[in-house]
Amino acid sequence: MVSIVRVHLPSEIPIVGCEITPYVLLRRPDGSATTDDAPESAPVDGCFLRYKWIRIQSDKKVPVCSIHPTEAATLQCLGCLKVKIPVTKSYHCSAKCFADTWQHHRVLHERAANTENGTEEDGSGDHLFGRLPTQSPSTNGPVPIVNPDKNSGETWYEVGRSKTYTPTSDDIGHVLRFECVVVDVDTRIPVGAVSSILTSRVIPAPTPTPRRMIPVVPGGSGAEAIQGGFDMDGRNASVTSMGTFTVLSYNILADTYATNDVYSYCPSWALSWTYRRQNLLREIVGYHADIICLQEVQSNHYEEFFAPELDKHGYQALYKKRTSEYLQIYPGNPNNFDGCATFFRRDRFTHVKKYEVEFNKAAQSLTDAVITAGQKKAALNRLIKDNIALIAVLEAKFGGSPSPDNSGKRQLLCVANTHVNVQQELKDVKLWQVHTLLKGLEKIAVSADIPMLVCGDFNSVPGSAPHTLLALGKIDQMHPDLSIDPLGILRPINKLNHQLCLVSAYSSFARIGGGSYELEQQRRRTDPQTNEPLFTNCTRDFIGTHDYIFYTADSLTVQSLLELVDEESLRKDTALPSPEWSSDHIALLAEFRCKPKLKH
């Protein structure tokens, strides 16, 4: 007879919107163990598993803090109730918690007030919170079931009958109980005892501070920026105007690398993939980008989650997995291999062509051509790091206007998505990879008059040799990074150039004169020496910029940019990832317009 050996939950803390899949270990009659499901449609040895999820609702519901969801709330922001913000976002665990986050919390008020055409708060925050009264349990929802302990002061509600369950807002503050029992397929009578396990109290999904789109074109206004802002719930989202399009670049932090050892400062429940994937998806979808370039996307997560989920939102997908010569550090589990994924809206673009750049193949060709036989093995060991780039050529639809000058010509766009080698000591390898990519893009540019975008995580700080090559098209022979070249692959130095007229989109904040208060605020978040963001990657060990969106300035102009995150907006989190932000990088988003082609 089949029996249940153990029931386990992947995370003790359930979060609204994040599916819970319990681990159920079964023992077969022959003594073997299995974790495979045994549904009624496919019984195992004449038995199947029956599941039940129960919400245990106390007579006194305990609201939880929206900032520190593991803490009970003691205060409620009355301003949130006034402008009809979801009640779960109004709770705070202390007056200090509310005061510390007021400057960011008020953004929720402003957005909600704008949506409802209401009046914004005066900004003091002094009158906006009150002590929470004791709350009675909700009378809405499922019908109560029998609680075996009638004196516990709790009411039980059955909320699910499948193995998995996704907590809802009705579950916030309550404990969930998972039950499973072996049932005879013929008699339909339970066999053996019911196995059960309790969760901790359900918490709401933490919400990051909303980020707004800031116009960078002359005459852009702060009002436009507020109305064009990003909202996690999909409300008040930016909508591109006719002839413009938006591009998102985001390193989402592959689950393979998101270990408790590396990110010990992040709560384990917030580091789990079941939580992070939902939080990342909600963030990505909320930006409403026309083109999405993601890095560190594991192959199984692409196939099983991102591709099907983004397909529901109208995106077509392209993917390139990292090659595997170097990644044998994960033997036997190719799903751990990450790669680059590019998505584009089917109603805005059609796919024309896909190019895949494997730097390993380029390394093999290079060593065959310029490295002596005695050095070849050492050269390949240094150059082969499994990094790749994914290049997509798209044709823009733009509401039926194929080109900005309405000439009837096809408007093509080339989008490169890459993740450059991470090892900081291999400065020559980083520069060689970027140069190799640029030379490939130049070949495409020669074959077609086409605007280009070069997006990704370049693992190179502003002013480094790779960044300099991208931004300036050449490198000074005295650049310090060029001193590291044990293989001689960077010589002669004058070959390190390109003719693509690339400009970093986020340098627009510093390059555009004048402008609104919001624009000036963004300038303070950029490096005055390089005009790049102060950081796009923020961990305990590193704070700096590695991510960029480059564009060909002779064919595209920047219209607006997603505002940069300042360190203060990370609240009390000293690093990423955190419960609010599920990657150690921040997303970059730029709106572009194609320049009219000159008529000859």
Image: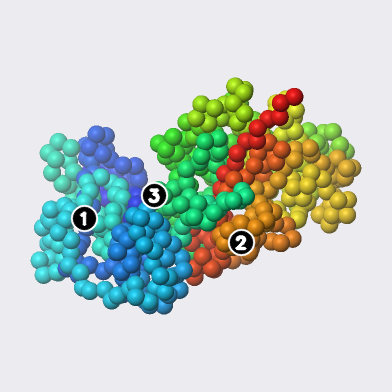
Classify 10 Å Cα crowding around label 2: few (below 14), some (14-19), many (20 and above): some
Classify 10 Å Cα crowding around label 1: few (below 14), some (14-19), many (20 and above): many
Res. 537 image quadrant: bottom right
Q: Residue at x 65, y 32 (%)?
A: 596
Locate residue 140 relative to residue 509 in the image: left or right. left
139 w.r.t. 440: above or below: below
Q: What amino acid type should be assigned to the residue bearing mark 2? A: Glu
* Residue 350 picture location, percent across and down: 53, 27
* Residue 224 picture location, percent across and down: 50, 51
525 w.r.t. 309: above or below: below
248 w.r.t. 8: above or below: above
Disc 2 element: helix
Q: Residue lying farthest top?
A: 408
* Residue 502 picture location, percent across and down: 72, 42
Disc 3 element: loop
* Residue 83 picture location, percent across and down: 32, 61
307 w.r.t. 252: above or below: above
Residue 282 in view here? no
Q: What amino acid type should be assigned to the residue bearing mark 3? A: Arg
Q: Are marks 3 and 1 in contact (CB under 8 Å)?
A: no
Q: Residue at x 35, y 44 (%)?
A: 34
Q: Are marks 3 and 2 in contact (CB under 8 Å)?
A: no
What is the C-alpha distance between the residues marked 2 and 1? 52 Å
Which residue is tagged 1? 54
Locate residue 180 relative to residue 255 in the image: left or right. left
Which residue is tagged 2? 520
**Depth check, front residue: 397 or 587:** 397
Q: Residue at x 42, y 38 (%)?
A: 313
Classify 10 Å Cα crowding around label 3: few (below 14), some (14-19), many (20 and above): few
Task: Say which mark, if any, is on residue 235.
Answer: 3
